[in-house]
Amino acid sequence: MQLAVQTGSSNPEIAIVRTAIVEARTAREKADALVEEVGSQLALARSECQNGERTLAIKRLETLALRHPSSTALHVELERLRTEHRKLGAAEQTQSDADQLALEAASALEKGDAQTATRLAEEALARVPSHEGALRTSAVAHARLREEAERAERRQRAAELVESAKSFLARGKFDRAVKDARRAAELDPLGDAHAVIAAALRRQASDAAREASAQEAARRT
């Protein structure tokens, strides 16, 4: 064709071929430009995702997709990022919910409410089983609940022994009354056992004094 141009040939087919070549070159240049632009924007979007800027990356590719709706690679990557964004967003929300529940559990434990602390910690662990804060709070709260249950059981047993001691005291069996009351005092030092012990000892001393006085009176007669 170049020879034809040089010789001044005016064959119409030469002009058609020349136009086709120019159009092909232009199309190739546009295709190359598209590949370069899409490639650079994809690389930038991936970098933004790695830096936690997923929303910005998706917006970038959505804008690019509007300009190049026929780019299959672009649309595939855009959909992948959207799916990943949804999954990560859900995971982040779950983690955030677990963090908040763990904080509330720790606060309840600090206020002495081990029951509420246990419930909130378990809710946090249901969302994130490996949550360290919730695990710590749960362990401490369960330990306190066990201690409270044991104290309640000791108080209950102490109350039963105090009632037994009062019954013995009413029947004048002071030694048995003191024995049960002292066992109660060991279980619940702040309970009523000490009062029962004191009453039993006073009654015992009083009865002993009356008996001694009676014996002295009998001896003198």
Image (cartoon, helix red, strand yellow):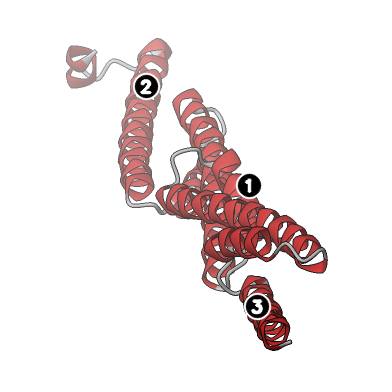
Q: Earlier in the sequence, mark 3 or mark 1?
A: 1
Q: Amino acid at mark 3?
A: Ala
- Residue at (52%, 62%) from the top-left corner? 186
Examine the image and state in which quarter residue 133 appears: bottom left
Q: Amino acid at mark 1?
A: Glu
Residue furthest to the front in view is 221
Examine the image and state in which quarter residue 70 appears: top right
Q: Amino acid at mark 2?
A: Ala
Residue that mark 1 sits on: 123
Residue that mark 3 sits on: 208
* Residue 169 at x, y percent in the picture: 76, 67
* Mark 2 burial class by Cα count in 10 Å: few <14, some 14-19, many 20+: few
* Residue 25 at x, y percent in the picture: 32, 26
Image mark count: 3
Q: Earlier in the sequence, mark 3 or mark 2?
A: 2
CA separation in Å, label 3 and label 2 = 128 Å
* Residue 204 at x, y percent in the picture: 66, 75
- Residue at (28%, 15%) from the top-left corner? 9
Residue 186 visible to an observer of this rendering = yes
Which secondary structure, mark 3?
Answer: helix
Residue that mark 2 sits on: 24
